[in-house]
Amino acid sequence: MNVKRYSVLGLLALALVLLAACAAEPEVITETVEVEVPVEVEVEVTRIVEVEVETIVEVEVEGEAMTETVTEQVAVEFSGGGDTLATVQDRGLLKCGGNANLAGFGFLDPDTNEFSGFDVDYCAAVAAATLGDSTAFEIIPTTGTSRFPTLQSGEVDVLIRNTTWTISRDTSLGFDFNPVTFYDGQGMMVRVDSGIETLEDMAGATICVQAGTTTEKNLADVFRALDIEFTPSVLPDNPSTTEAYAAGNCDGITTDKSGLLSIRINNLDVPEDHVILDDTMSKEPLGPLTRHGDNNWNDIVTWTVNCTIQAEESGVTSANVDDMLSSDDPTIQNLLGVSGDLGQALGLPNDFCYQVIAQVGNYGEIYDANLGPDTPFNLARGINAQYYDGGLIYAPPFR
């Protein structure tokens, strides 16, 4: 027999065996495998933000008392994220960071122990929008240096306190600014008998300024640009700054022009002996601010402010708001919650703006009640007029 023939036959037999094995039902093997599945959980996050805190230190140089500003970095716990609306509604009270020493904007009356002012009314407006009760708020008094840590730590829900919108505050300090409620500019007040008529006349002057504010930095920048030598007297808060100027320790005092007007009328024995110079040293857009990380709460404060502005434009006031409920104007219907569900998107009743206007008033009413012709300030609207009257006040559409 041929050996090659047997080898071929053997290979064919092996192939048939393998084919049969492959045609047979395969064996099922069961194996347990652990798989990691990502699960989303809510985590409360806090982060540490360093803020500049300026301390006033008294030193004595060759027998002469002087003040020196020392800036230090202080870590502040930042209460980011969360649901501020739920916190406010569960508490039944809005905590609003404010001013206690600036008449017309935020002032604590020592006789009645009650707060009043333009900014205070906006705290009331947010309370009306979120709680349906414009009286359900508490003012937490803050100073120029304490206001930011107070908001960052969550001690207050919103800060409404003559605070200037700047890029660093909006970003690195962890805040979100809301619409501007008052456009201002930094000014200078001096005594009439000083002979000072412009900033250029203040060479060698001593100027009172409050610590921890954009005012202090603007003063240094403007006088440096004008190449004017001056001596800053930096004080820790508005009362001490005002007292130093009233006592004659400074040739001039600088802050926002609205603040100077308040000081002139309310804190100086003879207001006519003092004059606010025409020079405007800066842009000071003032308004509320909230913490980063809670977009819905920021939207609520934003559209509460816009509500008051749009109401004035649409002719809706606290006196006629009930009549306006039957208006055919679609903007007014949306504004007051007669139609649409604009409040629902904020987690609020659709009539949130109605509550604001009925209980607090529109922008013009708030302005006139605190700063208008029937107040000691008699402050013209100027750039705080509505856009159709040549001002900068303007609300996006309610639709």
Image (cartoon, helix red, strand yellow):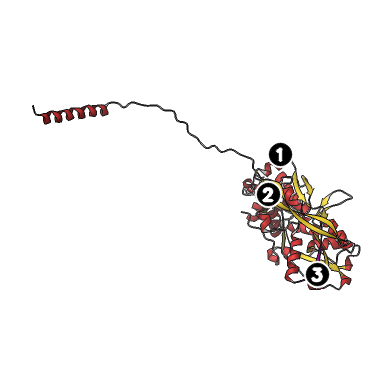
- 66 in magenta: no
Position of the C terminus by quadrant: bottom right
Label 2 residue SS:
strand
Question: Which mark is first along the chain, 1 or 3?
Answer: 1
Measure how far apart labels 3 and 2 are at the Cα level.
38 Å
Position of the N terminus by quadrant: top left
Three-letter amino acid code at disc 3? Answer: Leu
- 234 in magenta: yes
- Which picture quadrant has residue 162? bottom right
Task: Name, please, the residue furthest toward the left.
Answer: 1
Say whether residue 147 is visible. Answer: yes
Label 3 residue SS:
loop
The magenta segment is 227-236
Mark toward the viewer: 3 or 1: 3
Q: Quick check: 272 left or right of 184?
A: right
- Which picture quadrant has residue 365? bottom right
Along the viewing direction, whichever of 44 and 379 lies nearer the viewer = 44
Mark toward the viewer: 3 or 2: 2
Three-letter amino acid code at disc 2? Answer: Val
**Which residue was labeled with disc 2?**
49
Say whether residue 211 is visible. Answer: no
**Which residue was labeled with disc 1?**
90
User: 10 Å neighbourhood of mark 1: few (<14), some, or many (≥20)?
Assistant: few
Question: Which numbered circle lies on residue 277?
Answer: 3
Measure how far apart labels 3 and 1 are at the Cα level.
49 Å
Please report contact status of discs 2 and 1: CB closer than 8 Å, yes or no.
no
Mark toward the viewer: 2 or 1: 2
Along the viewing direction, whichever of 275 and 10 lies nearer the viewer = 10
